[in-house]
Amino acid sequence: MPLDDRVLTALECNPYLARRNLRFETSEGRVILRGVVNTYFQKQMAQEAIRHVDGVDEIANELEVCWA
């Protein structure tokens, strides 16, 4: 299974991130998370959701927290 698919599955299966509009890019083990979440907790949960995905060596968490 490609890294993109494994990351997408991990994000979609996380109950704290369900139906979030998150985007990501993968390249040679590096994952860049982008998008908007409501809390810093969700930002951290997105990172934790993919931390142990096979093939992920580095995570750049560029998610924005917007309280509105």
Image (cartoon, rainbow, N blue to C red):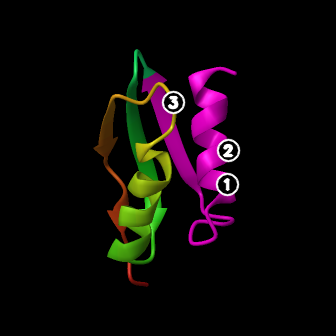
Whether 30 is drawn above or below 21: the answer is above
Q: Looking at the image, which is closer to me, 67 or 3?
A: 3
Q: Are marks 1 and 2 in contact (CB under 8 Å)?
A: yes
Which residue in the structure is indicated by mark 2? 9
For residue 18: magenta? yes
Residue that appears at 40% across and 22% down = 29
The amino acid marked with disc number 2 is Thr
The amino acid marked with disc number 3 is Asp
Q: Are marks 1 and 3 in contact (CB under 8 Å)?
A: no
Whether 58 is drawn above or below 41: the answer is above
**CA separation in Å, label 1 and label 3:** 16 Å
Q: Does 30 sit left or right of 37 as displayed?
A: left
Residue that appears at 59% across and 52% down = 11
Q: Write the start and end of the magenta stretch as one range.
A: 1-26
Quarter of image, res 45 = bottom left
Which residue in the structure is indicated by mark 3? 54
* Chain-order first, disc 1 or disc 3: 1
Marker disc for residue 12: 1
Q: Are marks 2 and 3 in contact (CB under 8 Å)?
A: no
Whether 63 is drawn above or below 17: the answer is above
**CA separation in Å, label 2 and label 3:** 12 Å
Q: How many marks?
A: 3
Q: Residues within 10 Å of mark 2 (few under 14, many from 20)?
A: some
Q: Which element is circle 1 on? A: helix
The amino acid marked with disc number 1 is Glu
**CA separation in Å, label 1 and label 2:** 5 Å
Marker disc for residue 43: none
Image location (x, y in percent) of residue 39: 39, 77
Q: Residues within 10 Å of mark 3 (few under 14, many from 20)?
A: few
Point out the frontmost of discs 2 and 3. 3
